[in-house]
Amino acid sequence: MILEIADLQVRSGQTTEFETAFSEAQRIISSMPGYLGHELQRCIEQSNRYVLLVRWQTVEHHEIGFRKSQQYQEWRRLLHHFYDPFPTVLHYEQIAGSGP
């Protein structure tokens, strides 16, 4: 399993609209091959900052299967205009600890 972590900073005053759009967009990502689950968490100290955690079977499921899909264009349309700056997205693999 691979964990994708995206550090999202939403433009000031647009968090409600972002959360509404994400509610729709999450249906897109959850339908993709290799998708295992996701979480969107809002920062307590900075209310316009979020972290998106997505579990994939492989990096390729995210980088090729999702990002090169037609569905990704809809994801971009729904969400990308909220970000400033554009998010950093990295992939991680578990080496210690409990959990999936």
Image (tube, rainbow, N blue to C red):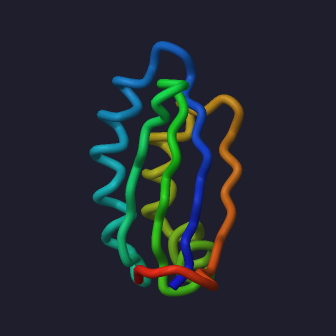
Residue 35's spot in the image, x, y percent?
40, 76
- Looking at the figure, which quarter contains the C terminus? bottom left
Residue 75's spot in the image, x, y percent?
45, 51
Q: Quadrant of residue 80?
A: top right
Horizontal side, residue 36 vs residue 44: left or right: left
Horizontal side, residue 31 vs residue 40: left or right: left
Q: Residue at x 45, y 81 (%)?
A: 98
- Above or below — where is 13 with respect to 38? above
Q: Residue at x 48, y 42 (%)?
A: 77
Q: Quadrant of residue 68?
A: bottom right
Q: How many marks?
A: 0
* Along the viewing direction, whichever of 16 and 44 lies nearer the viewer: 44
Q: Residue at x 39, y 74 (%)?
A: 32
Horizontal side, residue 64 vs residue 88: left or right: left
- Above or below — where is 78 with respect to 28? above
Q: Residue at x 66, y 29 (%)?
A: 84
Q: Quadrant of residue 33?
A: bottom left
- Above or below — where is 29 with respect to 80? below
Residue 7's spot in the image, x, y percent?
61, 46
* Along the viewing direction, whichever of 83 and 6 lies nearer the viewer: 6
- Above or below — where is 51 with respect to 72? above
**Residue positioned most to the top:** 13
